[in-house]
Image (spheres, rainbow, N blue to C red):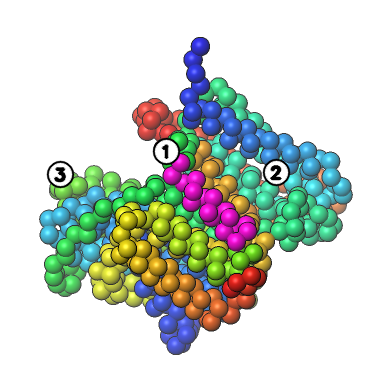
Amino acid sequence: MSVMSLPRLQHIVASGCVALVGIWVAYLSYTQQPSEAFLFPRLISSVFVVLALWTFAKACLGWTKVGAGVSVHAFVNMLPGLLIAIVYIFWGAKALGFYTATAIAFFVLLSLYDPAPHGQIKSWGKRVLITTGFMGVMYGLFALLLKVYTPREVLF
Amino acid sequence: MEFIFYFGDVFTPVNFALLLVGTIGGLILGATPGLSPTMAVALLIPFTFQLEATQGLILLGAAYTSTVAGGAVSAILLKIPGAPANIATTLDGHTMAQNGQGTKALQLSFLSSAVGGIFGVMLLIFLTPVLAQWALAFGPSHLFWLAILGVTVIGTLDSKSVVKGLLSGCIGLWLATIGFDDIMGAQRFIFHDALGGGINIIAALIGLFAIPQVISMFAKGRRGDGAEVMQVQKHSVFEAIRVLFRFPRALGIGMSTGAIIGLIPGVGGQIAGLVAYDQTKKFSPEREKFGKGHPEGVVAAEAANNAMVGPSLVPLLTLSIPGSPTAAVLLGGLLIHGIFPGSDLFDNHPDVAWTFINSMLIGQVLMCLFGLYVAGVAARVAQVPQSVMAAVVLGLAVFGSYSVQSSMGDVYVMAALGIMMYFLERFGFSAAPLVLGLILGPIAEANFIQGSMIANATDGLGPYFLGGALNLFLIAVVIASVAYSAWMEVRNRRYLSKEEILV
C-alpha cells in the first residue's frame, strides 16, 4: 500500500478547507434573509463552490500541479516567528500597549532570526540599537507626524 | 493638451518635496530584496491619509515608478532582483558588474528606465482621456462585466493555475460582500465584531502583500544572506548616454513591448522585461554576447519594465481595471480619497488626475538623476539581513493598518488575511486576483443590483446582461482570457517537469 506524499496530503487539506468555506458561504447566501441582500453573494458563491470542489477533486486524485506546499523544515523555521507575531497582534498590542508590545516583538523576532551568534555581547548590543532606532522612527512617524493615537493600556 | 496647464502644480513646494521623497525612498525600497513595488506602495498608503488626494497620489506614483527602477540596483550589484520586474536585468547586468562595468550597467539601467518610463507616461497622457470618454457609454451591465473582466483577467494571467486564480478572485469578491448590505442594510457574513464595517481595503492590501512576505522570511530561518556587493568604478554619464543610443533597436523593442504588455490588464513588468530581453536577443546581430555582460540586454529589460508603468495605469484610470497588482493597490489609494476612476476623474477632478500623471513624467527624470547617486546607498540597504526586514515590515504593517481608522479590528483583519494568504500562496493561489475581487467587488455588486432593477422593469435579466454588442464583446474577452490562460497552462506543462511546476 503506497503512503500518500506530504504535498498531496497538504493539497487535499488546503483545498478541502477552501471548499468548506465555499459551501458555508453558499449555504448562508441561499438561506439568510432578506434574500434581496444576498443576490450577489449567491451568484459568487455558486461559482466559488464549483471551482473549490473542482480543486478539491483534483487534489484528491493527485492531479494538482501548482504549489509546493509547506516543507517540514520551513514550517519549523516559521513557527516561532508566526507564534510571536500572533501573540503580538492578537494580544500584546492591546494588552501591553502598542509601542511596548511592538518593541518586545521586534527585539524577540530580530534575536530569533538574526544569523549573528547569540553568545556575543556585541551582537546583542547591535540588536538593542536596531530596536531602539526602529521604535524611534515609528514613534516619530506615527505619534508625532501622523498623530495616531494608539492603545496605551498597561504600559505604553 | 490639457495636461500642460497642470504642470505648475507638480512644482509647488509640498508636491515637489513628496515627489522627491517618493522617488528617493522608492529607489531604496526597490533595491531591497523582498520588498516588491506592490508591497512598498501598500505600506505607504496609510501615510497618505493626512495628505490631499493629489499629494497622496504623487507619493504613491513616485514610489511605484522608482521601486521598479530601484530593483535594478540589487539585480546588477547583488544578482538578487529587487522586484520580479528586474529578473531579466540580472542576466547581463550582474555579469557586467563582475567584469568591472557595474557603474556603466547602473547608468544604462537608469537611463533606459527613464526613456522607457517617459514613453510609457506619454502614452498614458494621450490614451487615457480618449478611453475615459468612451467609458461614458457604459451602463450598469457593462460596468458589471468590466469588473468581472478585471478579476478574471488578473485571475487567469497572473496565476500559474487558471482555476486557482479564478477561485482567488471569487474569494476576493466574497470578502467584499462582508459587512452591511448597502441597499437593504442587512448583515452579511459578520462572524466577528471586527468585520462589522466590512473589510477595510487598505488593511487587507497590507495584510495580503506584506504578511506572506514576512512569513516567507521566517521560513528561511536563521541564515545570513551572504550576498556580496560588487565594487563599482567611475564611469562617465555622457559615455553611458552615447552607449544607450548605440542600441536604438533594444530601446525600441523594450519600449514597445513594455507599453503593449502594460496595457493588457494583469500581465505586469516581470513578463515585460523577459519578453523584451528575449525579442532583442532574437533580432540582435550580437546575440551570442547576451548573458555574458552585453549592455543591450540591460537596455532592453529596463526600458521595458519602466515603459510598462504608465500604460498599466490606462485601464485603471479609465475603466477601473488595474494593469498590474501595484496598479490595483493604487486604485485602493484613489478610492480612499473618494475619487473614482473613469470620466468622473477627468471631468470633476482634472487637477488631481493631471497633476498625478505629470508628476510621474517629472518623476522619471528625477528617478534617473537620483538613481545614479542613490545606487551606492541602495546597494548597502539591499544587504540588510532578512531578520531585520521581517521585523520592520511586520511593525510597519501593524502600525499602518491600525492608523487607517485607529481600529484594532483592522489589525486583526490584516493579520488574519495575511496568514491565510501565505498558506494559500504555498498551494498555488495568488494574492493579485483576490485583491482585485476585494476592490472591484463593490463596483460589480452595485452595478449588478442596479442592472437587475432595470432588467426587471424592462426585458428581464438574461437579455439585459447577456444582450447588446458591448456586453457580448466583454463576455467574449472574459471567455477568451480564460481560454488563452488555460491553453498556456496546458502548453507549459508539456515542457516543464512536475518538480519545476511545483514551486
Q: Residue at x 49, y 48 (%)?
A: A80
Q: According to the image, label 3 marks what residue? A: B288
The location of residue A42, given as percent across then percent down, is: 76, 43
Residue B184 image position (x, y, % from top left): 84, 57
Q: Which residues are magenta?
A: A76-92
The percent position of residue B255, horizontal first and vertical second, equals 33, 59
Q: Amino acid at mark 2?
A: Ile
Image position of B432 (left or right of B462): left
- Distance from disc 2 to disc 3, alpha carbons, whole Å, reads 51 Å
Query: SS for tag 1?
Result: helix
Q: Are marks 1 and 2 on the same chain?
A: yes
Q: Chain of mark 1?
A: A
Mark closer to the observer (1, 3): 1
Q: Assess whether mark 2 and mark 1 are in contact (beta carbons under 8 angstroms).
A: no
To which residue does mark 2 refer?
A44
**Left or right of B167, for residue B486:** left
The residue drawn where x is 47% and y is 62% is: A106
- Please give left or right for residue B307 compared with residue B438 in the image: left
Q: Chain of mark 3?
A: B
Q: Residues within 10 Å of mark 3 (few under 14, many from 20)?
A: few
Q: Residue furthest bottom?
A: B13
Does the residue at mark 2 contact the one at mark 3 (Cβ under 8 Å)? Answer: no
Q: Which mark is residue B252?
A: none
Q: Is residue A82 magenta?
A: yes
Judged by depth in the image, the label closer to the viewer, 2 or 3, is 2
Figure check: B320 above or below B238? above
Q: Position of residue B477 (x, y in %)?
A: 56, 44
- Callout 1 amino acid: His
Whether residue B302 is visible to the viewer of this picture, yes or no, is: no
Tell me if residue B152 comes above or below residue A15 in the rendering: below
